[in-house]
Image: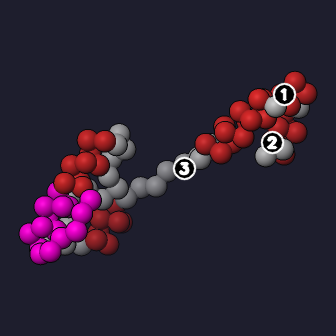
Amino acid sequence: MGTARDAGELQRLRRQAEHYMTTHYAQQLAIPHLTEDSSEDVDAIVDRLSFTKTYHLFAYEFLSAWYALIGFDALASPLLKDLAP
């Protein structure tokens, strides 16, 4: 979001970035309020994180749309659809 010339500017930019992320993204930050002067150890924060399964379907949905656009969906073959992309 910018370039800092000193520690004060860096802190201001970090606050601006955190504000931007919290107001523009629905997903919560993985490590909220983690700064250089944080009294909490990074390892302790990471140990408390929980990871869940994620699926990235964008490519599949995009390619499926092209598959339908060129008319392959008329074949009604789910196996071909999964193998084609």
| Mark 2 or mark 1: whose residue is earlier in sequence | 1
Q: Residue drawn 32% across and 72% down?
A: 43
User: Which numbered disc covers residue 53?
Assistant: 3
Place residue 66 in its image quadrant.
Answer: top right
Q: Residue drawn 24% across and 72% down?
A: 41
Badge 3: residue crowd in 10 Å (few <14, some 14–19, many ≥20)? few
The answer to whether 59 is drawn above or below residue 17 in the figure is: above
Amino acid under label 1? Gly
Place residue 48 in its image quadrant.
Answer: bottom left
The answer to whether 16 is drawn above or below residue 83 in the figure is: below
Badge 1: residue crowd in 10 Å (few <14, some 14–19, many ≥20)? few
Q: Which residue is at the far left? A: 8
Q: Which segment is the magenta one? A: 1-15
Magenta segment's dominant SS is helix
Mark 2 or 1, closer to the camera: 1
CA distance separating discs 2 and 1? 15 Å
Amino acid under label 2? Asp
Amino acid under label 3? Lys
- Camera-side residue: 40 or 4? 4
Q: Classify residue 69 as left or right of residue 32.
A: right
Mark 1 or 3, closer to the camera: 1
- Camera-side residue: 71 or 50? 71
CA distance separating discs 1 and 3? 33 Å
Across and down, in percent, residue 80 comes to 88, 39
Across and down, in percent, residue 12 comes to 13, 61
Q: Residue drawn 84% across and 28% down?
A: 71
| Mark 1 or mark 3: whose residue is earlier in sequence | 3
Residue located beneath label 2 in the image: 82
